[in-house]
Image (cartoon, rainbow, N blue to C red):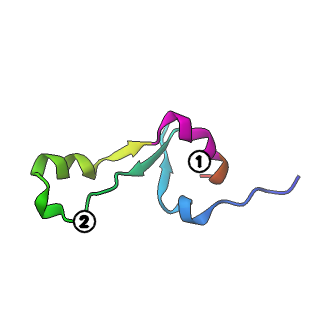
Amino acid sequence: MPKMKTHRGLAKRVKRTGTGKISHKQAYHHHKAANKGPKRNRQLRARKIAAAAEQRRLSRLVPYI
């Protein structure tokens, strides 16, 4: 069976956690940041875990990360 290809666009945007889940940066952080409160901007800075329903689909796109 041939090797699977990694989806390079997704590989640049996600990382795998120690438990094997896929994490990503939160959207809406940079655009019009001055209009958002400091607490909201601080929370948007943190990495988020991808939704449970998406984990299997994303894992197939990036099998080797």
Tell me if residue 63 can be seen: no
Give the dominant element type of the magenta stretch: helix, strand or loop. helix
Q: Is residue 50 above or below residue 15?
A: above
State the SS at label 2. Answer: loop
As drawn, the label of residue 25 is none
Q: Residue 44's x, y, as percent?
A: 26, 50
| The quadrant where residue 27 appears | bottom left
Q: Residue 10's x, y, as percent?
A: 54, 59
Residue density around tag 2, few if under 14, some if 14–19, many if 20 or more, within 10 Å: few
Q: CA distance from mark 1 to mark 2?
A: 25 Å
Tell me if residue 53 can be seen: yes
Residue visible at 13% across and 46% down in the picture: 39
- Total labels: the figure holds 2
- Does the segment drawn in magenta span residue 38? no
Q: Bounds of the magenta span?
A: 50-59
Residue visible at 72% across and 60% down in the picture: 5
Amino acid at dot 1: Leu
Residue visible at 12% across and 60% down in the picture: 35
Q: 36 left or right of 9?
A: left
Residue placed under numbered mark 1 in the picture: 58
Q: Is residue 31 above or below residue 42?
A: below
Residue placed under numbered mark 2 in the picture: 31
